[in-house]
Amino acid sequence: MTDPINDHELTEISQRLQALAQTGLTYARDVYDRERYDSLMLIAERLLSARFDLSEEMLKTLHKNETGYTTPKTDVRAIILREGKLLLVRESDDGGWSLPGGWADVGDSPSVAVIREVQEETGLDVNVSRLLGVWDRNLHGHPPYPWHVYKMIFLCEVTGGEIAISHESLDIGFFDPDCLPELSLTRIVPEEIHASIRTAREGGPTYCD
């Protein structure tokens, strides 16, 4: 007897079905194949809407903006240390704390994306020192999410600017990494923070996966 499907597996199945349908609709030319991929997309949307707090209509709207071969989304985050303490921002949507960062925009290199996000969220100008890790969001205890995401975490050094709260944040502060506030787990989890700081301090290899 096979084991029941767990939450992580259901999330991955939903993501894969949506990706297969989107990629199929991109390349299929036969009208019957397109009908099959349309049906597969409907199944994926029903699974996603049942799994996540999103209506089927909202998913249809979001998927209309997704075209081409399906790939994971890219989230960039910054580790900024000052006298051993870590810079965090408090997110306005859920009240949890996170590393400054966000989605990488098309046309940005990863380092440009994280520099921009830090400036927008904190008012600080930074340089990127090194890539600390590339994390698969599905594998590290984040709450489930409709899309597959790779998280790139960079070590950054402040070069200027002044701390300022943006419209996306409720607060900004430096914290002892061993005494973190309540995190915005949809964005960052303790494992990613602690592993990244160890890599930054010890000069170890970049984390992957």
Image: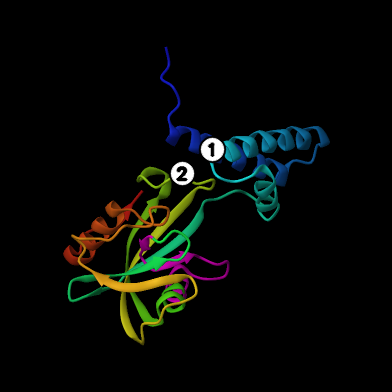
Residue 67 appears in the figure: no
Residue 73 x, y percent position in the rendering = 52, 55
Up-down: is 174 above or below 96? below
Q: Is residue 111 magenta?
A: yes
- Give SS at disc 1: helix
Specify the quadrant of the image occupied by residue 127: bottom left
Q: Are marks 2 and 1 in contact (CB under 8 Å)?
A: yes
Q: Which residue is mark 2?
A: 144
Residue plotted at (39% across, 47% down): 142
Q: Bin the neighbour count of mark 1 within 10 Å (Cα to Cα): few under 14, some 14-19, many 20 and up.
A: some
The part of the chain drawn in magenta is: 96-116
Q: Nearer the viewer, residue 97 or 148?
A: 97
- Give SS at disc 2: loop
Q: Which mark is residue 51?
A: 1
Q: Nearer the viewer, residue 103 or 98?
A: 98
Q: Image quadrant for the N terminus?
A: top left
At label 1, the amino acid type is: Arg
Specify the quadrant of the image occupied by residue 157: bottom left
For marks 2 and 1 on the same chain, the one whose residue lies earlier in the sequence: 1
Residue 4 x, y percent position in the rendering = 44, 22
Q: Is residue 194 magenta?
A: no
Q: Residue furthest right?
A: 31
At label 2, the amino acid type is: Pro
Residue plotted at (28% across, 52% down): 191
